[in-house]
Amino acid sequence: MSSKTRIIVLHMKEIIYTAIFLALAVVLAVILFFMFGPGKAADTKVQEKSLYKPGVYTSSITLNDNSFDVEVTVNADRIKSIRLVNLSETTKASYPLMEPVLDSLASQIYSTQSLDDIQYAGDRKYTAQVLLAAITDAVKKAENT
């Protein structure tokens, strides 16, 4: 039997190109893993658990042909601000308790992040009820269902 020795010649260029392509393949695999891996499922679960859809929500109030809005701003888990918008000077003069009562309600809502068990003075009962109904309507629009 004759044994022939085979000599394989590898050029350094071919080795370098092969190493570069293997490194790029590994980098691509790692990037694809992080893009489509298990981390995405956890992010979508966090979004599903949020209380509100972030944004600005309004509810209208009409009193004796005077119309204005209550604007509620929320992020995913908190009520950020509550304010009156489109409130004319005539309406401010006609209903002077609107702004102070809203400030009182808003401070309670900010601290408890709830619309339940809100306290208001007996002489401001009806103003508070009108504002609280409008705030509740705006918050219901913002809730994640």
Image (spheres, helix red, strand yellow):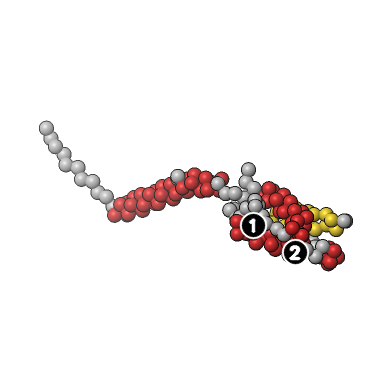
Hey, which residue is sitting farthest left in the picture?
1
Q: Position of residue 95 (x, y in %)?
A: 82, 62
Camera-nearest residue between 142 and 18: 142
At horizontal 80% and vertical 65% (from top left) the residue drawn is 96
Report the amino acid beneath label 1. Ile
Q: Answer few, some or many: residues within 10 Å of disc 1's Cα (few below 14, many 20 plus, some between 14 and 19).
A: many
Give the vertical position of 89 relative to 29 (above or below): below
Quadrant of the frame with the N terminus: top left
Quadrant of residue 88 in the image? bottom right
Answer whether residue 26 is visible to the viewer in this image.
Answer: yes
At horizontal 69% and vertical 48% (from top left) the residue drawn is 141
Camera-nearest residue between 9 and 57: 57
Which residue is under mark 2? 99
Hey, which residue is sitting farthest front in the picture?
122
Q: Position of residue 74 (x, y in %)?
A: 64, 56
Which residue is under mark 1? 109
Give the vertical position of 68 relative to 48 (above or below): below
Q: Position of residue 46 (x, y in %)?
A: 52, 48
Contact? badges 2 and 1 (CB < 8 Å): no
Please give the count of numbered marks on the rendered protein: 2
Camera-nearest residue between 98 and 42: 98
At horizontal 64% and vertical 48% (from top left) the residue drawn is 143
Hey, which residue is sitting farthest right in the picture?
65
